[in-house]
Amino acid sequence: MPHQATTLNRFDVWAPNAGSVTLLAGGTEYGMTKGAGDWWRASNAPEGNDVQYGYLVNGEGPFSDPRSRRQPDGVHGLSATFDAGAHQWKDGAWQGKALKGSVIYELHVGTFTPEGTLDAAAGKLDYLVELGIDFIELLPVNAFNGTHNWGYDGVLWYAVHEPYGGPAAYQRFVDAAHGAGLGVIQDVVYNHLGPSGNYLPKYGPYLKSGEGNTWGDSVNLDGPGSDEVRRFILDNAAMWLRDFHVDGLRLDAVHALKDERAVHILEDLAIVADSIEAASGVPRTLIAESDLNNPRLIYPRNSNGYGLEGQWSDDFHHAVHVNLTGETTGYYADFESLAALAKVLEHGFFHDGSYSSFRGRHHGRDIRPDLAHPTALVVCSQNHDQIGNRATGDRLTATLSPGKLALAAVLTLTSPFTPMLFMGEEFGASTPWQFFTSHPEPELGEATAKGRIKEFERMGWDPAVVPNPQDPETFRRSKLNWEEASKDHHAQLLGLYKALIRLRRTVPELSGGGFGQAGGFGGVTVEFDDDEGWLSFSRGDVTVACNFGAEPFETPLDGAILLATDTGAELSDGALRLPGESAAVVRVTR
């Protein structure tokens, strides 16, 4: 980890690009002096709480504090002080949770409840406990331009979005979650900044011009001045894990972190998390989102890995999605068979050095079972990206039968990996989750809307069906309708999810601990027939049988049914008979 500078005072600001910096606080200007490492300090800075302030840089501004903890008037307004130590925590008995054996629930604060606030989300904690969730994963809550957004266009990483309730509400949420026995994972974005309200370049070389990624200029992780940029990231991670008692971080799109240093920023982040875990005695979990299929992310640091606890596995999603929906366009093309799903279940990745037709090259590498456990792979049948990045933001509910929705649940929750649900999936929410923005600048809003429509028009979509992300109705229709959860087939699916999670917790072979004789990735065996449309996989003495076809099928099996998605499932005379589009979990008699 880079050398740590002198302890910072609350108004100190790093500004190597500046010839002059003036602190504007409470309507008064305070001159600042440049010190060691290009940090500027105001010797007579104001005392007290609730100070609103900003900086005049080279006479321009005022601009918000790069490390602002509050933005009461939005990202273009003044920053405000916040004392994170003032909260009286009630989670002293909280021992934390390990990733292994857990179930994650991904939610977006703004659309999870009608109110769209952290306090309102806290009101649903009992529901999540009853469902059987272990970790709540919050989509980014950092301050972004406008009132509503997915959160990935944040520009002030230290501030909690004010319409969600700000930092005090965030602390209340985490405290309440721990009190309910739930861990909290925060989604953080360190690979880019949003298009509006990003004043960091006024201060210093936070970005590398000309070295962009999908979303704009890359963050300067390895160029001149990058020591302090990395410190900016590492201090932010420490803020979530220490000041806000967060149990883990989901690191967005780490493949877009361009870092050629000998010690990668991900390894530095793991060191920070481990040090806070050692000091607190509470586990701190880092999970990377990556499309690289590079298991080095989850290998221990003493084995030349980065030492992260987990990473997302898109291959699982793609294999499940294709075999349930039949969609084979784009990156789905290589997954058009039960053989692809079988490979993922047995080996973790489908592309483990194999040819990727979507990329036009070979991709990934195999996972060493002596260095990584299957539960280090976080998997899902739906998530915010895979729903929201579709043209109309449609969930699986929009196209799949109840039987196939049940199959998706069984595959995700009985797999050898760590399952993650996307909010509302568990009751088959009919509401879409669409791409929505609220840029106040007319030009930016128009460009965003036109760009979205053109993107899908190129794919052959009728532009009339693509929602305008700037239309407030796009945001409103993406909110969950909680009345559905207790009605008809929604309630039946919710009951299945609860039963599956309960089964995961009570059956050792499904909980992540018991993996058969070989252990690791070698402990799962799969049989399938593409022509007949069935697949079964065994984890120790438990077999999960899935019938993807419309017709019943029969397979030799003896034992007892632990769970079936269709009442027509029958186990007798040494054979399991499954109706079409159904699954069963069986305790096998050897």
Image: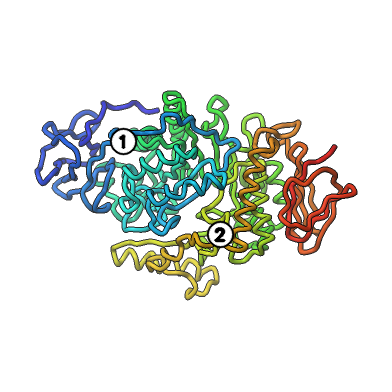
- Residue type marked 2: Ser
Of 29 and 16, nearer the camera is 29
- Asked where in the image residue 459 lies, by quadrant, the reply is bottom right
Residue furthest out toward the right:
573
Q: Mark 2 points at which residue?
A: 486
In this view, 366 is above or below 403: above
**Picture coordinates of residue 191 (x, y %)?**
42, 45
- Picture layout, residue 468 above or below residue 12: below
Residue lying at 41% horizontally and 59% vertically, measured from the top left: 114
Element under disc 2: helix
* 479 lies above or below 31: below
Among the 4 quarters of the image, the one containing residue 243: top left
Mark in front: 1 vs 2: 2
Which label is found at residue 87? 1
Q: Where is residue 26 in the image (x, y as percent from the top left)?
A: 12, 44
Relative image position of residue 573 (x, y in whole percent): 90, 49
Label 1: few (<14), some (14–19) or many (≥20) C-alpha neighbours in 10 Å: few
At 44% from the left and 43% from the top, the residue drawn is 186
User: Toward the viewer: 304 or 476?
Assistant: 476
